[in-house]
Structures are given as structure tokens and as C-alpha cells.
Image (cartoon, helix red, strand yellow):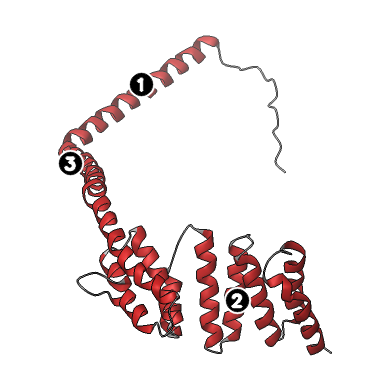
């Protein structure tokens, strides 16, 4: 490690007057250098003044344009998108509670009667909150229609700060992979889903699904660990009622 060493207290052999002359000379050189530098700076500013002013004006113009866009374009666009989403979501909600609901899901996806569906909203209102929710609902529509590849496509594109919806979207991707027979991928997404949020609904739900599919691909110890977490941390959940039965089943697999 480098250490700081004091210099010896040697006396200067130069006279004080000589030292003062040197100091004055050095000071003069410093000021002369500053004068030259200042002169050069002024010359540069004068030469490029128009460019500098143009650049500053451009920055201000961009800032004002952005603020104006948000006020007069962004906000109305978001309101319009939300209005269109309400109609598409209406068909989606009916489909959830109806048998033979594929036609309703298609109506929610593609729109009708001059109104946009989820896919139109995604294309025409990109960046708005409504477009984000439309992406989630489109993925869920395809999942319920058993179009698992499109379900994965749209749910994977969904991005939200809402941890509940985030967990549900990851879990739904897991469901799609499970239905495609891709159990490793399904397991990974179920794990992602229960790690995204700690609550009494999605966490035990996807812990349980991860344990079931994990037991099918040989992750026995992890599966039992997930089930025990449900039992200890979420004893009042729906999944907790089935934990002991599943632990017994998985332990028998391992014998």
C-alpha cells in the first residue's frame, strides 16, 4: 500500500528576493495564459454563436413540443383508447361467463359495429395504458380459445407495474406452455409468477401449479418445498386444502 512520506525540512539556498522574483514571474505567466485562453474562448463563441444559439433553441423547442404533445395529443389519445377498450372488454367479460364463447372472444379481439377490438387498440394506441391492458386481454382471449401460441405471444409482450396482473400474465404463459406439452417452460413461468407477488391469491395458486408440474419433470424436492410453503404461509388458501394429498402422491412417486 502506498504511504504518504513527509519531505525533509531542508532550507532553500535561494534568497528570498530571488524566490519572490520567480513567484511574480510565475503569477504573470498564469494570468497571461488565462488572458490567452479567455481570448480563444471568446473567439470560438463569436465564431459559433449562431450554432450555439440554434442548438439551445432546438432543445427548448423539443421540450415544448413534447409537453404540447402530451397535453393536446397524448391525453386525448389515452381517453379515446380507454373508450374503445371498454367495449372490447365488455365482450371479453361476457365470454368469460358463457359457454361456447369463442365468437365473443373473437368479437373482443377484432371488434365490430365500427368499434375497435383488442388488436386494433394495440395497433392504433401504442404506448397508452389502454393498449397495455388490451395486450393482456388479447393474450387471455387466445388462451381461453386454446390458441396457445398467440396467447404466449401477447402475454409475453404485456408489461405492467401492477404486480397482480404481472403475476397472472406469467402464470397464464405457464398454462399455455403446459397445454402445449412444454412442461419445463411451464414450470419456469409458474415459478416466475409466484415470485412476482406475495399475496393470498396468485402466490399459492402458482406455487401449487409449479409443484404439480415440477413433480412430473423430476423436481421432487422443489415440489414438496412449494407445497409446504402453501401449508405454512397460506393455510387459508384454496390450494392449502389439497396440499397433504399432493405431498402424499409426490412422496409415493419418489419411492
Q: Residue at x 25, y 66 (%)?
A: 124
Q: Quadrant of residue 223?
A: bottom right
Identify the residue under disc 3.
Answer: 54
Marks 1/3: CA–CA distance: 33 Å
Front residue (pair 101, 216): 101
Element carrying mark 3: helix
Rendered view: 47 above or below 191: above
Indicate which label's residue lies in the foreground, 1 or 3: 3
10 Å neighbourhood of mark 3: few (<14), some, or many (≥20)?
few
Quadrant housing the N terminus: top right
Instruction: Please report whichever mark, 2 or 1, sits nearer to the chain's N-terminal start.
Output: 1
Instruction: Please report whichever mark, 3 or 2, sits nearer to the chain's N-terminal start.
Output: 3
Q: Residue at x 45, y 73 (%)?
A: 155
Instruction: Please report whichever mark, 1 or 3, sits nearer to the chain's N-terminal start.
Output: 1
Identify the residue under disc 1.
Answer: 31
10 Å neighbourhood of mark 1: few (<14), some, or many (≥20)?
few
Q: Is residue 195 visible?
A: yes
Rendered view: 70 above or below 98: above
Element carrying mark 2: helix
Number of marks: 3
Front residue (pair 64, 165): 165
Q: Is residue 138 visible?
A: no
Relative image position of residue 245 (x, y in whole percent): 77, 80
**In this picture, residue 68 sits left or right of residue 234:** left
Which of the numbered marks, if any, corresponds to residue 188?
A: 2
Relative image position of residue 93 (x, y in whole percent): 41, 70
Q: Residue at x 70, y 27 (%)?
A: 6
Q: Residue at x 45, y 85 (%)?
A: 146
Amino acid at each position: 500500500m502506498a504511504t504518504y512520506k513527509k519531505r525533509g525540512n531542508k532550507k532553500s539556498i535561494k534568497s528570498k528576493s530571488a524566490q519572490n522574483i520567480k513567484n511574480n514571474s510565475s503569477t504573470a505567466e498564469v494570468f497571461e495564459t488565462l488572458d490567452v485562453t479567455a481570448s480563444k474562448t471568446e473567439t470560438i463563441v463569436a465564431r459559433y454563436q449562431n450554432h450555439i444559439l440554434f442548438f439551445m433553441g432546438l432543445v427548448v423547442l423539443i421540450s415544448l413540443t413534447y409537453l404540447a404533445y402530451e397535453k393536446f395529443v397524448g391525453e386525448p389519445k389515452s381517453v379515446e383508447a380507454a373508450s374503445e377498450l371498454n367495449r372490447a372488454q365488455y365482450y371479453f367479460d361476457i365470454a368469460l361467463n358463457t359457454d361456447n364463447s369463442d365468437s365473443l372472444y373473437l368479437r373482443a379481439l377484432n371488434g365490430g359495429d365500427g368499434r375497435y377490438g383488442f388488436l386494433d387498440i394495440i395497433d392504433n394506441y401504442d404506448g397508452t395504458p389502454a393498449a397495455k391492458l388490451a395486450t393482456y386481454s388479447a393474450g387471455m382471449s387466445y388462451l381461453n380459445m386454446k390458441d396457445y401460441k398467440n396467447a404466449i405471444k401477447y402475454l409475453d409482450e404485456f408489461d405492467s407495474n401492477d404486480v397482480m396482473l404481472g403475476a397472472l400474465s406469467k402464470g397464464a404463459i405457464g398454462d399455455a406452455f403446459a397445454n402445449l406439452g412444454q412442461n419445463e417452460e411451464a414450470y419456469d413461468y409458474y415459478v416466475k409468477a409466484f415470485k412476482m407477488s406475495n399475496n393470498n391469491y396468485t402466490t399459492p395458486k402458482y406455487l401449487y401449479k409449479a409443484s404439480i408440474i415440477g413433480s412430473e419433470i423430476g423436481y421432487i424436492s422443489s415440489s414438496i418445498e412449494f407445497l409446504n410453503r402453501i401449508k405454512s404461509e397460506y393455510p387459508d388458501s384454496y390450494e392449502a386444502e389439497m396440499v397433504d394429498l399432493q405431498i402424499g402422491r409426490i412422496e409415493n412417486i419418489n419411492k
